[in-house]
Amino acid sequence: MKRVLNIVVLSIIMSMFLSGCMNIKERILDDIQLATAAAYEYIDEDKIEVTAVFPNFQPDKSVKNETLVASSILSKEIRDKHSLQSEKPLVSGKLEVTLYEKKTAERGIKDLLDTLQRDPSVGSNVYLAVIDGSPRELLSKQYGNMDNGIFLSNLIEQNIESGLIHKTNLHQFLYKYYAEGIDPMLPIIGRKDGKINLKAIGLFDNDKMVDHIEEKEYFYLKILLNRKGENDTHAIQLDGNTKVSIFNIRSKRKYQIPKPMTNNEIIIQVKIKSMIREYNDGILTKQKLKELEQAMEEDIKKNSEEMIKKFQEKKIDPLGVGEEVRTRTRKWNKEKWEEIYPDIKISVQVTMDIIESGIIE
């Protein structure tokens, strides 16, 4: 009994101590505006315009999206300007996604990320994306009966979970930004026919977007980027009018780097197991199946190597080839690697195994 009493007394003392030292300030949800998305755009050399969106819940349980727009040379000052436009203080504790206008991303977003890193109320899982178009216009539209911040977060998340794009958030971007031997990527979103869609993947050199890859290249990027992958889909057109679609793809990727930090060839080995979802050239024979596997191996090899060559020409490394080299050498030198990287031959070896194809003649 005495032991229990001591624990109770200690708990009371600790709670009093913590509340006094941490100076925790209570926030009543009805008394604040919870921003769920924020979009950044440089409107001149030094001035940033930030559009913040927050949900306004209606009596009929529908959601009306409200936006606040303000500009300043410092993003923290903009929060105060937003609050001047609102009947309630605007807080960022529920921020789901931050967006960067395309030209702003090409200029560099390092300074704009600083405010997120320094804000303890913003989690590292907040999604980042590039906007192709006006942030003010995009966030002012209503996309179904849903808060726009949640809508954009769900859009990015479901494309990650379905295997269409790589995982991306604040934590991932900052890791790749500060790491040696890998560069960040972000999804690019925009409006088409009144709807938001994921248009491309932006490729960054440090904090500046310098190029992008289109939707048709997503598959090649994914299998080269991830050590293990699954649930991917891919469709190609072979000679003539023959078309084939494969799904439930399971892939494994590993590197062969015989002599790190030299100009020797680097080989990326990719092994793929998949099923045929659609085939438009009659019944598959065993011979056709072998020809199909070979044709898909050649397609993946060709497109993957072309994509890697484009990365080397831009002197960017979104696949993290440099990181693979760094983990295999005791004499890593960032400057030397950046010098030799564009000229190294990087080959892709593909092994395709179709494990199910329906009826075979």
Image (tube, helix red, strand yellow):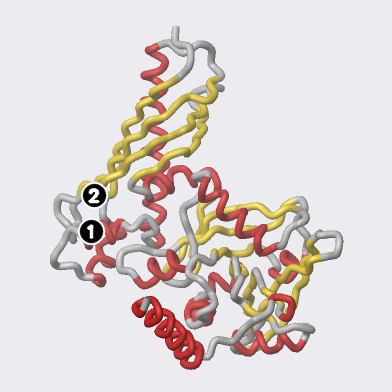
Q: Residue furthest bottom?
A: 20
Label whose residue precedes the other's in the sequence (2 or 1): 2
Residue 67 in which image quadrant:
bottom right
| Image quadrant where one finds the N terminus | bottom left
- Mark 2 surroundings: few (<14), some (14-19) or many (≥20) residues within 10 A: many
Q: Residue furthest right?
A: 60
Q: Horizontal placement of 44 versus 59: left or right?
A: left
Residue, disc 2: 266
Question: Quick check: marks 2 and 1 in contact, CB under 8 Å?
Answer: yes
Place of residue 8 in the rendered image (x, y in percent of width and height, measured from the top left): 43, 80
Residue 100 in which image quadrant:
bottom right
Q: Residue at x 64, y 80 (%)?
A: 91
The correct choice, above or below, for 333 with respect to 213 in the image is below
Q: Horizontal placement of 92 versus 308: left or right?
A: right
Q: What kind of residue is marked 1?
A: Val
Near-viewer residue (153 or 310): 153
Q: Is residue 111 visible?
A: no
**Dot 2 lies on which element?**
strand
- Mark 1 surroundings: few (<14), some (14-19) or many (≥20) residues within 10 A: many
The correct choice, above or below, for 107 with respect to 58 in the image is below
| Image quadrant where one finds the C terminus | top left
Q: Horizontal placement of 49 versus 174: left or right?
A: right
Q: Is residue 220 visible?
A: yes
Q: Residue at x 42, y 68 (%)?
A: 205
Place of residue 327 in the rendered image (x, y in percent of width and height, measured from the top left): 21, 60
Place of residue 320 in the rendered image (x, y in percent of width and height, measured from the top left): 33, 58
Front of the two marks 2 and 1? 1
Q: Which mark is residue 325?
A: 1
Q: Horizontal placement of 83 versus 59: left or right?
A: left
Q: Residue at x 41, y 54 (%)?
A: 310
Spatial CA distance of label 2 from label 1 is: 9 Å
Q: What kind of residue is marked 2?
A: Ile
